[in-house]
Amino acid sequence: MKAAKPRRGQAALLGLGLDGDDGHTRLTRGDNFVLFGGSQETHAVMQETAVKVNEHLDRRGKRLEDVSPKEMVDILREIHD
């Protein structure tokens, strides 16, 4: 019997905007993230945040799956300071 390959974890950021009342359905998919809904402004903020998270991960040589919750909080704080 063949040994099972170890599974690599997968992680993704999910952005959900609840303030979209202009009739538009906004959906953005990218590396490590899916963003849905929100006003134009809120969706743009979610997009910028997701892109910056990926940039931080690239600079650190890490994948989203490799980051601890505490490290993720640190990245998000750094982005929004």
Image: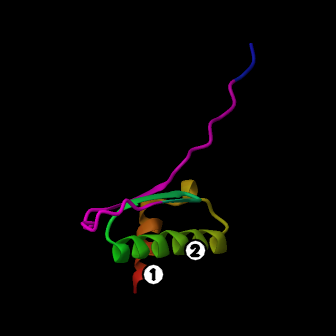
Q: Residue at x 46, y 80 (%)?
A: 79
Residue 30: % across, % down: 56, 60
Q: Could you tell me what secondary structure mostly forms the magenta stretch?
A: loop
Instruction: Tell me the kind of residue under disc 2.
Output: His
Is 8 inside the magenta-drawn segment?
A: yes
Vertical position of residue 30 compared to residue 40: above or below: above
Residue at the far right in the pictured view = 2
Chain part drawn in magenta: 4-27
Residue 49: % across, % down: 46, 73
- Label 2 crowd bin: few (<14), some (14–19), many (20+), radius 10 Å: some
Residue 55: name its quadrant. bottom right
Residue at the far bottom in the pictured view = 81
Q: Residue at x 53, y 75 (%)?
A: 52
Residue 48: % across, % down: 48, 76
Residue 51: % across, % down: 54, 71
Quadrant of the snapshot with the C terminus: bottom left
Q: Secondary structure at mark 1?
A: helix
Q: Which label was assigned to residue 78?
A: 1
Instruction: Tell me the kind of residue under disc 1.
Output: Glu
Vertical position of residue 42 compared to residue 27: above or below: below
Q: Which label was assigned to residue 56?
A: 2
Most foreground residue, 54 or 59: 54
Q: Residue at x 63, y 71 (%)?
A: 60
Q: Secondary structure at mark 2?
A: helix
